[in-house]
Amino acid sequence: MRVRGNRATYKIHLGSANILIEPDDRYLCIVPASKGRTTRIMLPFEGDEVLTVVLSKVLMLAADDKITDPTILAQLNRRAHR
């Protein structure tokens, strides 16, 4: 799935939820927060863990200008060395 954010365009693999940043296909590592730190929201697709992760990444990356996590921001600001 291709997602266009304000900082970049991303490709999210629907089977694994892995993310690549276009145009050079840099890997972006985003892992879910521990369950103790987040409020649990019941979703109609809750039984499908990969779908849940993919959709949460789509929503986050579509609004990538609102990301405040320093680990994610460091990856987004890193330039590829090619």
Image (cartoon, rainbow, N blue to C red):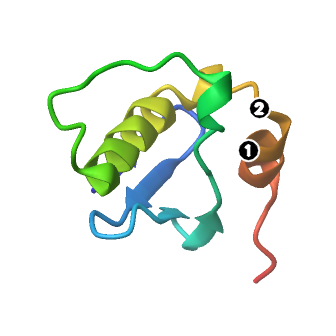
**Which SS class for mark 2?**
loop
Q: Nearer the viewer, residue 46 or 66?
A: 46
Q: Is residue 57 left or right of residue 1?
A: right
Which residue: 76% across, 53% down? 75
Mark 1–mark 2 contact, CB under 8 Å? yes
Amino acid on which the number 2 mark rests in the picture: Asp
Amino acid on which the number 1 mark rests in the picture: Ile
Reply above or below: 28 against 40: below
Reply above or below: 40 against 76: above
Q: Is disc 1 surrounded by few (<14), some (14 to 19) or many (20+) residues within 10 Å?
A: some
Which residue: 58% across, 44% down? 32
Which residue: 60% across, 38% down? 7
Quadrant of the snapshot with the C terminus: bottom right
Q: Which mark is residue 36?
A: none
The residue pinned by badge 2 equals 69
The residue pinned by badge 1 equals 72
